[in-house]
Each structure stands twice: as structure tokens, then as C-alpha cells.
Amino acid sequence: MTIKAVTPRVVEPPARLGMGVSVYPSATAMVWPGDGHAHEAVAVPGVRLAPGDVLVEVELATVCGSDIHTVLGQRTAQAPLVLGHEQVGRVVALGRGGAKTTDGHRVTLGERVVWSVAVPCGRCARCRRGLPQKCLNLQKYGHERMRRGWELSGGFATHTHILDGTPLVRVPDDIPAEVLAPASCSTASVAAALEAASAIVPLDGALVLIAGAGMLGLTATAMATDAGARVVVSDPLPGRREAALAFGATAVADPSSLPAVLAKAGGRSAAPTIALELSGDPAAVRSLLGAVDVGGVLVLVGSVTTGPELGIIPEQLVRNLLTIRGVHNYAPRHLEQAVRFLTDAWQRYPFAEQVGETFALADVDRALATTSHPRIAVRP
Ligand SMILES: [Zn+2]
Ligand SMILES: [Zn+2]
């Protein structure tokens, strides 16, 4: 009888306890305590990284419209929480076993990354149906009540604790952070919206009508133009219409003059076959539904706060073969597309210039109150 040699092994603490990581000076998160309160700086001297977790030092975060909606009380949020879900940063620590980017690359220390707003579980029925952004166990950066063990859960912090399973995408070192930070919300959401539209009508050669020339609208204008579409942008603000032209719009219109502008821009095919509603304005939703051509598609993205009901005439949908799609957040492939697009396009369109002002992390309240530009940034 032979006795099997016993291989000595290192007994590690249970994996669920994670790996303790400290940074000095301590990581700081700006915590929003709830309605009517200013942010408070909270020191987080140590984090525990579970296997697959990543600690990222935030380089720059941008303020998304939904952060503003939260502090204005227009959407419910479980306070106290760390807001911010558009940011770029560098990996400073890895949990046991390391982590991989969405393309299978093993993440290394010092790498520059962006990450999805959503942490899907990857196992539930929704994840299996290809809707990770609507995972039944969903957690979202910048959206969750602060809890012990996941204090650094948003972008308005010196560091963000990236949970295992979060889609991570590498980004080039030579692209300004102002260009990259919006990738994880506005750019990826636009990629998802255009994918939804192009499943019905190919973008190449299409006349696309976009309502709203904020960060989403400008990004969509450039992305659709690059895909071969002619884009007409409607926005009530002259400055925003001017920006849309710099992002490739064929024509721009005040909502009141939209029919005339469309007729001029559309030529023989005067009506758009793709309409993207990115403003959230109920009047724009109605206007786009009325403008879209037979066989066309209306993609709704901007309506993220409670608004009035929209009267739909079923006969209009039937006879005009219309499709209406709602798009909220995105899947990991859209974040990859967003980074690819920005890497290719950032020097052709004035993306960096859309970040108007940059505040220190401690001044995040001022950043949230500033609306002079499509994006305002916070630099830790
Ligand atoms: Zn899931
Ligand atoms: Zn957002």
C-alpha cells in the first residue's frame, strides 16, 4: 500500500472575508445624506476586496443628469449614498485571483479602465435573457445606499471599489479623461439606443431625427453620422443647436420650426425613419412620434422621470408599421462599443470641450448645481 504524499498548502482565510487593502491617504467618498443636505466627506481607510474585485483610483468623474435628478428629488434614491457613475480611473489593487476585462484580458495594476454602471449577477433569468442591465439582483454604481464593505460604491470618490462581475473595459492612455468619463453612461447608452434603432432600420443612409442636444444627443449625432446617417437635431437652445452642428448634424431646428427644417433636409425622403428621443421632454416625444416615417422606429431614452401619459393612436402604429422602443442603460458590449467609438472619434468631434468646468471632489455640491455645459466634472 502506498501512502499518498500530502502536499503542504497555505491555509488562507476564507475567501468571503476578502483581501484587506489600505491606501494612504485614506480613500475618501463624498456621501450624499439625502434631500436638502450637502455632501459629506467620509474617509474609508481600508477596503476588503473579494476575489474578482478591483480597486480603482478615480482620475475624473462627470456629473450625469440622473445624479442631478437625484439631488433635486426627482427620482428616489436610498440615501446615504455615493453618487457618480461616469468616470475613468486606474487600477490600484486586485482581489485574489485578479480580474478580467470584457475582452478576456487579465487586468494589471496601473491599467486605465472604465466600468459599467451596472453589476449584473450573470445567473438570473434576466441576465440569461441578455438583459444584464435589468438583472434581478442588480447593483448600480452611484445608486446604492452606502453599506459596510462597499463604501466606495460611486464615482464621486477618490477610489471606486469595483465588484466582481462588473464589466470592465481598458481605455487608451492618450485620450483625455474628459472624453472617457462619460463612456459608462451617456456614450454606452447611445450605443444601445442606436443598436435598438438599427435592428429595425439600418443607420447607413437613414434620415435620423434626434430630440435633445445634451451629452446624449451630441454623442448620438456623431455616432449616427459616422454610421452613414444624415442627422437632424431639434433643441430649443441655440447654443446646443450650434454644438450639434459641430458633432456632424446635417441640420438643426428649434422644435417650432422642425417640420420645415425636416422637409428641407430630407429632400425626397422628407420624413425620418429613425427618431431618437433623448431630451425627456413629453412634447418632444409627441413631436417625434408624429414625425417618424412609415416603417420607422422611435427610440425613447430620455424619459427617465415620471411624466404625463402619452396618447397613442393604435391605428397610427398599425397603418404606419411603427416601432417604439424603450432603452435604459446598456449591456457590456455597448460599453465596449462606446470606448471604441470615442477612441476613434474624439479628435474629430469636440467631446473634451463638452466638459465645461471641473471642481475639486470636496466641491461636488457646486458641480451638481452647475448646468452651464453638457457635462461638469469632479477631479479627486
Ligand atoms: Zn442577474
Ligand atoms: Zn447616467
Image (tube, rainbow, N blue to C red):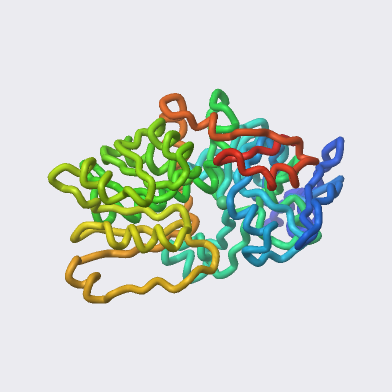
Residue furthest toward the front?
Answer: 256
Residue furthest toward the bottom?
Answer: 314
Quarter of the image containing the N terminus? bottom right
Name the image quarter holding residue 71: bottom right
In the image, 93 versus 349, the foreground residue is 349
Whole-percent x, y for residue 303 in the image: 48, 61
Whole-percent x, y for residue 173 in the image: 57, 26
Q: Reply above or below: 322 against 60.
A: below
Q: Reply above or below: 358 against 311.
A: above
Residue occupying image coordinates x 44% and y 47%: 236
Residue occupying image coordinates x 21% and y 42%: 264
The answer to whether residue 109 is left or right of residue 147 is left
The answer to whether residue 274 is left or right of residue 46 is left
Residue occupying image coordinates x 57% and y 62%: 121
* Camera sees residue 11: no
Mark count:
0
Name the image quarter holding residue 233: top left
Whole-percent x, y for residue 249 in the image: 34, 37
Q: Reply above or below: 62 against 78.
A: above
The answer to whether residue 41 is left or right of residue 315 is right
Quarter of the image containing the C terminus? top right
Name the image quarter holding residue 316: bottom left
Whole-percent x, y for residue 278 in the image: 44, 53
